[in-house]
């Protein structure tokens, strides 16, 4: 398997987390890059497993010292990827999966890093809204903000190498697996 940097982005509610979990189950050699964030942990999230939770001052110090490969402010919180983590894994011949927002994905693509980018989307904005409301975790104003941001993010899909519509989960998983198999074979 050739070492590749995979970027997976999606609007909130598109099912990216579910698809990424399925992908990692089937490709155990694929290294998941754990992002740093300033947001509060959700119930059940573990520091160092789901995210590296940090405060804003420490996060910005990492940005200013060049320790972040990419970073963005999303829904009022900062998210970023450690440059050292990614560089070390790629140098060791391991493929790395970045589960990041569109802003971060575009930073990496615009920077010119060799990567395979995959955009995950729901079949429609109505379905996306149903999924967000079905979570039962966000207040109404947060849902409205996520839907507004989703329109911008969906408009960015043309910058991605691949687009996967997550309508039927098994079909979306199969499409994502086929992309990774094809790209790592090259």
Image: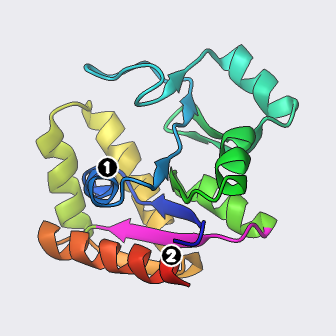
- Indicate which disc residue 115 carries: none
Left/right placement of residue 51 relative to residue 73 reads left
Front label number (2 vs 1):
2
Q: Residue at x 64, y 59 (%)?
A: 93
Q: How far apart, in angstroms, are the residues tagged by discs 2 and 1?
A: 21 Å
Instruction: Pinpoint residue 46: horizontal percent, then vertical percent.
Output: 37, 20
Q: Residue at x 46, y 60 (%)?
A: 9
Is 54 magenta? The answer is no
**Boundaries of the magenta span:** 112-121
Left/right placement of residue 157 relative to residue 21 reads right
Q: Rate crowding at label 1 as few (under 14), some (14 to 19) or many (20 or more) other CA atoms within 10 Å.
A: some
Left/right placement of residue 82 relative to residue 143 reads right
Question: Tag 1's secondary structure?
Answer: helix
The residue to which callout 1 is attached is 17
Residue 77 shows in the view? no
Q: Residue at x 71, y 58 (%)?
A: 107
Instruction: Pinpoint residue 114: horizontal percent, then vertical percent.
Output: 71, 71
Instruction: Pinpoint residue 38: horizontal percent, then vertical percent.
Output: 56, 23
- Closer to the chain start, of discs 2 and 1, is 1
In this rendered view, identify the residue nearer to me: 147 or 77.
Answer: 77
Instruction: Pinpoint residue 137: horizontal percent, then vertical percent.
Output: 22, 30
The residue to which callout 2 is attached is 184
Residue 124 shows in the view? yes
């Amino acid at each position: 398997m050739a070492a590749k940097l995979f970027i997976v982005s999606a609007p909130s509610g598109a099912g990216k987390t579910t698809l990424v979990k399925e992908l990692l189950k089937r490709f155990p050699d694929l290294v998941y890059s754990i992002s740093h964030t300033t947001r509060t942990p959700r119930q059940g999230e573990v520091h160092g497993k789901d995210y590296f939770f940090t405060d804003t001052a420490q996060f910005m110090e990492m940005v200013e010292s060049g320790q972040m490969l990419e970073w963005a402010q999303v829904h009022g919180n900062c998210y970023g990827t450690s440059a050292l983590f990614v560089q070390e894994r790629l140098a060791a011949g391991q493929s790395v999966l970045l589960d990041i927002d569109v802003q971060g994905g575009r930073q990496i693509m615009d920077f010119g890093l060799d990567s395979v980018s995959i955009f995950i989307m729901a079949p429609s904005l109505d379905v996306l809204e149903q999924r967000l409301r079905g979570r039962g975790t966000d207040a109404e104003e947060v849902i409205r903000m996520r839907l507004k941001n989703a329109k911008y993010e969906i408009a960015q899909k043309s910058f991605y190498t691949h687009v996967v519509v997550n309508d039927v989960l098994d079909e979306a998983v199969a499409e994502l697996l086929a992309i990774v198999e094809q790209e790592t074979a090259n």
